[in-house]
Image: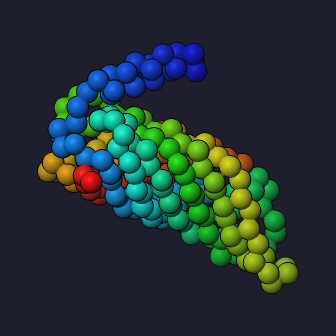
Amino acid sequence: MMRRCVPLLFILLSLSSRSQAENNATGELSAYTGILMGLGTRAAVGATTGYISQPYLITLFDFAYSPVGTETIRTIAPPGVNHSRLYDLSLGVHIQVPGRRRWTPYGILAASMVCTTYDDISTGKGRQSAFFGFQTGGGLRYFISDNWGVRSELKVIVSHRTFTRLGFGVFYQFSD
């Protein structure tokens, strides 16, 4: 499977390096909300900031937060977990599929640090767990005007535990 994906990735990157974006944007800011699945079904919020180095390639730093109750990202949660919170910091790329400007599908590749903080009821102390992870998935942007629009995306986060996040948000692209 991976051998088939690598040539497709290089084809998309070569197409993006020869194309020109219509709005010549160099940066992006966005905010989103959604649901987290796999650690219970929970609410999620997040924000991203990014650099548009080529017309169809956006490098993004993403921060997301979800309250996850009694769940942790550890395979076996310690007994007596309460008030657990999930933080996800990632650095990755959106590889956009060349096509119509208003509708822009994209794929996601990212490395992440996934952390949960929680209260250990048995000791009365706060604890945390952190693991490296990998993110993949895809999304769809819709440009309402030249510089801003809405997007929806589905991410699969593979770490010590695997979970997914479905998000809906707004974005704004700007030039220097």
Specify the quadrant that holds the C terminus: bottom left
Depth check: give the residue in front, 65 or 93.
93
Q: Quadrant of residue 66?
A: bottom right
Q: How is the image coloured?
A: rainbow
Residue 162 in view (yes/no): no
Q: Residue furthest front?
A: 176
Does residue 153 appear to the left or right of 87 in the view shown? left
Depth check: give the residue in front, 162 or 106.
106
Does residue 106 appear to the left or right of 131 in the view shown? left
Placement of 62 over or under 111, stated as above or below: below
Q: Residue furthest bottom?
A: 124
Specify the quadrant that holds the N terminus: top right
Q: Residue 72 in the image: x percent, y percent?
A: 70, 62
Placement of 128 over or under 110, stated as above or below: below
Residue depicted at 36% across the width and 40% down the height? 53
Residue 133 in view (yes/no): yes
Placement of 72 over or under 11, stated as above or below: below
Depth check: give the residue in front, 168 or 79.
168
Residue depicted at 62% across the width and 69% down the height? 85
Residue depicted at 40% across the width and 56% down the height? 49
Q: Residue 101 in the image: x percent, y percent?
A: 19, 36
Q: Residue furthest right?
A: 123
Q: Residue 102 in the image: x percent, y percent?
A: 18, 40
Q: Residue furthest left?
A: 145
Does residue 89 appear to the left or right of 93 in the view shown? right
Residue depicted at 64% across the width and 46% down the height? 133
